């Protein structure tokens, strides 16, 4: 019977703390142990939600490990962080932006120092190229052409990255840069009946060749124009594919480490997982996101390829889904690269080239004149703009364009739209950096509270 009595005491000692709602050492019950059932602060909640773990020495001491913040606390912190913008808290936003910039700069300097061999190799290659370029010889034209092509490709890759990587908001570089470039090449091709533009000044400036193409083309074809802008379009598409990697790596790292990154996109992903069990609460946008996730999860490579091959604002969710379910990197990136740089770019190129077809453009301007009141007023600026562009293409080398002397209304408006969008993009970067620093402060505060609770 004595053995039974000992077992009952052991069971009672284990069960009683569970009934009280908190593991505590014997003889050390305090008023704070009832924090779960009383009105407590958020810090007390985090301290109260603990996982007890008995030490190996058998003394009965319990090691408290505070749990992560609740959903309500995250939402409150996110709401406060959303107020850190230039038009609401200008001084705080600028201060946080500067501090975050300094922190990121120091982190990247440390990374460069840790990879000093790679940095030294790149510096030696650049120095060797510069020395060879300055040395007279028959190799100079080849190096000049290679350097020009390298910077031209890098320019479009960088614009593609900016278009999809985020930093608060994506800069729509297709509408601002690649689309107008394809449109200019299309107009010049139909006007010159050739795509053999003199280089230089092409691609910085487009001029008709002095002599007609040796091929003797009677009519410009769409495929010829598409081949002329294939390099720029592919590099821009490759840049957009590179810009989709951060969500993938973020979700993959969180899944492998078991750490909750407290990121808005991951929070959205978790909310979608909850809506799977309660589909009645999902909006039409949530249902569209769930469809994308289901397609990627079930079909794999071809599902990713399908999502990447069409203009899809929900593709970030596809990257997070692939990272969360540990889809291999080359499966995700290969499908994204083929979809964005090959399939989607050919669709977009075809659309722009058809839209700026000479006959179709003239028909569109004629239809514009049929609009009541504003139609005749808009028709004249468009006609002047198209006429000025044709004159610009047919000017002689070394001659300044007459269109540069007269500022067209459409060109002036388009220039101001570009400046506004670039300005808004820079503004969003400042806000994003400031909010990242706000998140950094919040995480350090939570870490200090956890450390204090453990002590």
Image: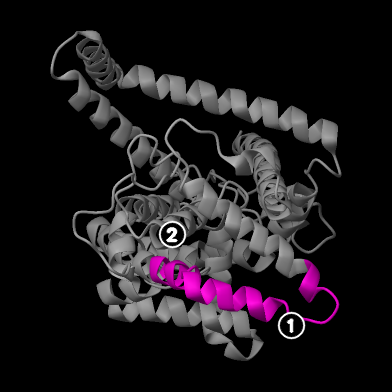
Residue 395 percent across, percent down from the top left: 47, 42
Residue 142 percent across, percent down from the top left: 18, 27
Q: What residue do we see at 37% from left, 68% from top?
A: 344
Q: Give yes or no for residue 59 being in the magenta stretch.
A: no
Q: Which mark is residue 84?
A: none
Q: What residue do we see at 25% from left, 64% from top?
A: 217
Q: Give yes or no for residue 361 being in the magenta stretch.
A: yes
The magenta segment is 348-377
Q: How is the image coloured?
A: one colour
Dominant secondary structure of the residues highlighted in magenta in the image: helix
Q: What residue do we see at 63% from left, 37% from top?
A: 440
Disc 2 designates what residue? Answer: 191
On the rendered structure, is 327 left or right of 421? left
Closer mark to the observer between disc 1 and disc 2: 2
Q: Which mark is residue 370?
A: 1
Q: Nearer the viewer, residue 141 or 7?
A: 141
Q: In what element is the residue under mark 1?
A: loop
Q: Is tag 1's residue or tag 2's residue first in the polypeptide sequence?
A: 2
Circle 1 packing at 10 Å, graded few (<14), some (14-19), many (20+), is few
């Amino acid at each position: 019977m004595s053995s039974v009595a000992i077992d009952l005491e052991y069971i009672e000692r284990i069960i009683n703390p569970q009934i009280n709602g908190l593991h505590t050492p014997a003889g050390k019950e305090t008023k704070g142990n009832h924090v779960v059932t009383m009105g407590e602060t958020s810090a007390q909640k985090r301290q109260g939600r603990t996982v007890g773990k008995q030490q190996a020495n058998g003394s009965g001491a319990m090691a408290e490990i505070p749990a992560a913040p609740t959903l309500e606390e995250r939402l409150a912190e996110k709401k406060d962080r959303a107020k850190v913008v230039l038009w609401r808290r200008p001084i705080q936003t600028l201060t946080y932006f500067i501090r975050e910039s300094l922190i990121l700069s120091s982190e990247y300097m440390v990374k460069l120092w840790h990879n000093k061999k790679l940095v030294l190799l790149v510096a030696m290659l650049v120095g060797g190229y510069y020395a060879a370029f300055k040395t007279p010889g028959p190799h100079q034209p080849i190096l000049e052409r290679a350097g020009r092509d390298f910077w031209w490709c890098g320019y479009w890759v960088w614009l593609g990255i900016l278009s999809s990587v985020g930093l608060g908001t994506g800069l729509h570089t297709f509408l601002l840069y690649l689309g107008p470039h394809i449109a200019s090449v299309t107009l010049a091709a139909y006007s010159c009946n050739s795509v053999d533009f003199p280089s230089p000044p092409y691609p910085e400036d487009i001029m008709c060749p002095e002599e007609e193409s040796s091929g003797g083309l009677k009519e410009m074809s769409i495929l010829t124009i598409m081949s002329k802008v294939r390099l720029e379009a592919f590099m821009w598409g490759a840049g957009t594919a590179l810009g989709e990697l951060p969500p993938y790596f973020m979700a993959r790292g969180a899944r492998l480490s078991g750490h909750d990154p407290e990121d808005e996109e991951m929070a959205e992903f978790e909310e979608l997982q909850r809506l799977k069990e309660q589909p009645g609460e999902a909006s039409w946008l949530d249902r569209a996101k769930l469809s994308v996730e289901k397609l990627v999860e079930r079909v794999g490579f071809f599902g990713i390829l399908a999502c990447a091959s069409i203009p899809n604002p929900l593709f970030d969710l596809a990257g997070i889904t692939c990272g969360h379910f540990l889809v291999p990197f080359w499966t995700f990136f290969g499908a994204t690269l083929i979809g964005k740089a090959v399939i989607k770019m050919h669709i977009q190129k075809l659309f722009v080239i058809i839209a700026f077809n000479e006959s179709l453009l003239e028909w569109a301007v004629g239809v514009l004149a049929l609009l009541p009141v504003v139609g005749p007023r808009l028709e004249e600026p468009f006609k002047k703009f198209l006429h000025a562009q044709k004159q610009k293409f047919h000017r002689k080398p070394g001659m300044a364009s007459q269109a540069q002397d007269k500022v067209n209304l459409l060109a002036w408006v388009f220039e101001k739209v570009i400046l506004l969008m670039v300005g808004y993009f820079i503004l969003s970067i400042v806000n994003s950096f400031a909010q990242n620093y706000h998140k950094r402060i919040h995480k350090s505060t939570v870490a200090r509270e956890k450390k204090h609770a453990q002590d």
